[in-house]
Image (cartoon, rainbow, N blue to C red):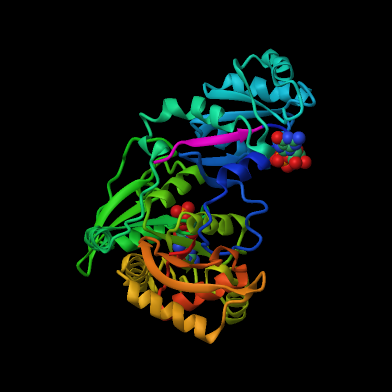
Amino acid sequence: MLPVVALVGRPNVGKSTLFNRLTRTRDALVADFPGLTRDRKYGQANYDGYHFIVIDTGGLQGDEEGLDLRMAEQSLQAIDEADVVLFLVDAREGVTASDQSIAEHLRRQEKSVWVAANKVDGLDADSAAADFYQLGLGEVYHIAAAHGRGINQLLQRTLQPLAIEYPDVLKVDEELPEDDEGLVRQAEFYADQPIKLAIVGRPNVGKSTLTNRLLGEDRVVVFDMPGTTRDSIYIDMERDDQKYTIIDTAGVRKRGKIDLAVEKFSVIKTLQAIEDANVVMLVIDAHDNIGDQDLSLLGFALNAGRSIVIAVNKWDGMDPDAKEWLKVELDRRLGFVDFARMHFISALHGTNVGHLFGSVKEAYHSATQRISTSQLTRIMEMAEEEHQPPLVRGRRVKLKYAHAGGYNPPLIVIHGNQVKSLPNTYKRYLMNYFRRALKVMGTPIKIEFREGE
Ligand code: GDP
Ligand code: GDP
C-alpha cells in the first residue's frame, strides 16, 4: 500500500504543475496513451525517493454549486480518504476568500494538512509565505512547483512520518538485476506466486457479479470484513492448477446482505488495488460509453506496469447493431492498449467468463517469462535490419545489444551510441517489434536506452 496525498487549492495556484512534476516518470518508454495525460487527476508519484499516490483534486473553488458540486464530490471524497492534504496557495496573490473557505473546510476535517505557498520564485519567500499563517493551518512551506524548489523539504516533512505505516513510501528503487542469475531468480520467484488479479471498473459495471462468477457458483461467500472504504477484499482461489488472489474492489460481501448498503465507489481503493496487482481486469459496461474514468484507470495500470485484461460485460441482450458500433468504438478509444485481450462476456449468465482465466494467465506469463540476452539482441538486430535507425546530428544511431533488465513488466535495456537521441517514432517501432517477436500479450513493455557499453 502507498500513502495517498491530495493536492487541494483553488484553480491556478499550480496544482497541476506540481502534479506533473511529482509524477514525471523515469525515462523508460512505456507506451503512449493519447489524450490521457492532459486531464488525468490521479498519478503515481515517484519523486526524490518518495513513492505515493497523488491526486489533483481540481475544481475546488470553496463555493461549489450545481455541476461544480458534483465535480467537487470526488475531490471531497479524495480528501476524506487521503493520508495527507497539501493545500496549495498562490504566494503572489496572497490570501483570497476562496483560500479562506477551503481552509475552513480543511480545518473541520481531522486531517494532516500542509500549506504550501507556491510561486515564490523571484519573491522574498519568507515574507510572501507569512500572509498564509492567518489560514490557521500551522506551518507554511514555500515552494516553486514550476522550478522544483522546496518540494523535497515539503515531502520530507509530510511523508517521513508515514514511513512506519507505509514502508513502501521510502522504497528504494529496486536495483536491476544485472547478472543472469538475478534475472533467473526473479523469473522463478514469479512463476511460484499466485497471480494477484484486481477486478476494477466504474460502479455498476458488474464487478461483484463477475467476481462471484469467477469464484464459482457453489462457493459460499461470507465476508464481513472490517475495513474502510479504502480496503479491498483479498480472496484466494485455484483454477486449473493455477493459484489466484482476487483483489475485489467491489466487495462481494454486497451479496446476501440484507441492508444492501451500496458501496461508495472509491477511486483510491481502485488505485491501491492496481498497485498491488499483477494483472488488472478492467470491467466495462457494454451499455455505457467508454468514459474518461475507464481511460484513466487504464492509464494508471499502464503507468504502474501492470498487465491488463479487458472484460466488456452485459453483452447479453445487445442488438447486433449496437454490438458492431461498440466494437468500433472500443478499437478507436482503446487502441493504446491493443496488446490487451478483450472479452465480451455476460457475468450475469456466465457467458465467456471461463475464458478470462486463460488471458489472465497468458498476461502474467508474458510479463514474467524469462527472455535471454541473445534472443533480445537477435530481435533487436532484425528490427534494425528491417528499418535502420535514423541519423542524429549527421551520425547514424548504432544499437549494440539488448538484454532483459527485469520482469513484471518486462524491461528491455538497449545499449548503443546516441540511443537516447532516437526519435520516439523509432523507439515505438522497436517496442512493437519486440512485442510481436516475443509474442507478448497483455502486458506493457518498458524499454530503457543506455549510452555506450
Ligand atoms: P492549477 O489550476 O492549480 O492546476 O494551476 P496550474 O498548475 O495550471 O498553474 C497555473 C499557472 O501558474 C500556470 O501558468 C503555471 O505556469 C504557473 N505556475 C505554476 N507553478 C509556478 C511557480 O512555481 N512559479 C511561477 N512563477 N508560476 C507557476
Ligand atoms: P458493481 O457495482 O460493478 O459491482 O456491479 P454489480 O455486480 O453490482 O452489478 C450491477 C448491476 O448490473 C446489477 O443489477 C447486476 O445484476 C447487473 N449485471 C451484472 N452483470 C450483468 C450482465 O452480464 N448482464 C446484465 N444484463 N446485467 C448485469
User: Is 164 included in the stretch rendered in magenta?
Assistant: no
Quarter of the rendering occupied by the C terminus: bottom left
Characterize the magenta stretch by its predominant secondary structure.
strand
Q: Residue furthest left?
A: 241
Residue 60 pos. (x, y %) = 69, 35
The picture quadrant where one finds residue 132 is: top right
Q: Residue pushed farthest bottom?
A: 386
Left or right for 127, reference 395 = right
Q: Quadrant of residue 209?
A: bottom left
Q: Is 357 rendered above or below residue 296? A: below
Residue 12 left/right relative to 412:
right
Question: Whole-percent x and y of residue 113?
Answer: 56, 24
Task: State the residue in front, 67 or 159.
Answer: 159
Q: Residue at x 24, y 63 (%)?
A: 184
**Image: magenta residue range:** 1-8
Of residues 61 and 348, the one nearer the viewer is: 61
Q: Quadrant of the N terminus?
A: top left
Residue under the point 28% across and 60% down: 179
Q: Position of residue 285 (x, y in %)?
A: 53, 63
Taking the image as shown, residue 239 lies to the left or right of residue 316, namely left
Q: Is residue 198 visible?
A: yes
- Residue 296's place in the image compared with 137, above or below, is below
Location of residue 94 in the rendering, given as x and y in whole percent from the top left corner: 77, 22
Which of the two residues, 201 or 419, is positioned nearer the viewer here?
A: 419
- Total marks placed: 0
Residue at 27% across / 60% down in the picture?
Answer: 190
Let me know if residue 11 appears in the view: no
Residue 107 occupies which quadrant of the picture?
top right
Residue at point 76%, 28% (across, down)? 122
